[in-house]
Amino acid sequence: MTLVQDRPHSHGAGPTGSPAERFTSRNPDDFAVPRGREEDWRFTPVREIRDFFEPFAEPTPFERESSAPEPASIELVDRDHPGVGRVLQPGDRVSALSFASARRAVLVKIPEHAALTEPIRVTINGTGATAYGHLVIDAGRFSAATVIVTYTGSGRSAGNVEISASDGAQLTVVHLEDGGSDFVHLQAHAVSVGRDASVKHVMIGLGGSLVRITPTVQFEGPGGSVELLGASFAGDGQHFESRLFIDHSQPNCTSNVLYKNALLGESARTVWVGDVRIRPDATGTNTYEMNRNLLLSDGARADSVPNLEIETGNIAGAGHASATGRFDDLQLFYLQSRGIPEETARRLVVRGFFADVVNRIGIAELERQIMAAIETRLGYTPDTDREIE
């Protein structure tokens, strides 16, 4: 079914929130300025990001540090480079503005058949200004690599990330948000999965004031698989929002989604929207998405909206699940009955809550870093809590 538009506007959705066709354009003027009532923006505090809906007056590039083991490479290229724009089709006004305004892009290239034993690292540090960014990660045929992208510092940034896994490639991309209390970041991720390729996309939300990430996945050939993982810990004044769209258009492809959020603070807020579409030709599809939210204090709010649209009956499996709740009193009672103090027991429950996401990253050093950051947010210090070390 085709959605016909007779005027510029952001793409909309039907009663379930899952659009039949997503309107995309690289022209920002093809999208109306969001007012906060649109399906795509109804959970976002639009009043806090109105400056993102018009071109930034004086954008300034953020600082960047990067490293890549051979034979991979990282270079800064002009926007007209043939590797830029192959995957991305902006689906909202902010993404389109960023694509039109970012003059250069960071290109991460993994050659064909290269199997990297060390991760590629890219760190973007906000300098307090406004900035547009564009990152391209291109994994060649039958390559294997992990890319860790970390955002730190302060400022207001909009950007796009293009992730391409060619036929047979195995690619892991870890996106870590660790900015300061005044960092606002809106970013669209476009993922292309080739024939028999696999992509693991991990979103970790720890720092920043308002972070909105919108990953989309497109399968380019049969046999592809994608795993979308997310773990966010929102405190007072933090808003973490993830909007996913997985478009199954090829046969025998697999998608698995697991996002977990913990919220601590009266104004802590998380949003997760997961849209999965299985088109008529996508026979043999196997897909499942799950979102879990743990409320650690009164006033915290987690919105969770899974959507599944199936247009063929010949699939291997499809499903979704969503739950939001507080501490399990039975778990706390069990731990305390064995002499573990209440605060330590609560920390162990939170650690266990995140473990099945973080442990799937596959990089021990990064997993420890993330868990340590989460425990710090819970007030844990090794000097005062040695009994479980």
Image (cartoon, rainbow, N blue to C red):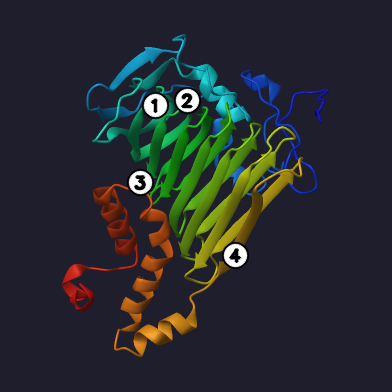
Q: Nearer the viewer, mark 3 or mark 2?
A: 2
Secondary element type, mark 4: strand
**Marks 4 and 1, how far apart at CA:** 38 Å
Labels 2 and 1 touching (C-beta < 8 A): yes
Mark 4 or mark 2, earlier in chain? 2
**Marks 3 and 1, how far apart at CA:** 32 Å
**Amino acid on which disc 4 is placed:** Ala
Mark 3 or mark 2, earlier in chain? 2
Labels 4 and 1 touching (C-beta < 8 A): no
**Marks 4 and 3, how far apart at CA:** 26 Å
**Marks 4 and 2, how far apart at CA:** 36 Å
Residue corresponding to mark 1: 142
Q: Seen in the image, is 244 located left or right of residue 198? A: right
Q: Residues within 10 Å of mark 3 (few under 14, many from 20)?
A: some
Q: Nearer the viewer, mark 4 or mark 2?
A: 2
Q: Which mark is residue 178?
A: 3
Image spot of residue 82 (x, y percent): 46, 10
Mark 2 or mark 1, earlier in chain? 1
**Amino acid on which disc 1 is placed:** Phe
Mark 4 or mark 1, earlier in chain? 1
Residue found at x 52% / y 17%:
85
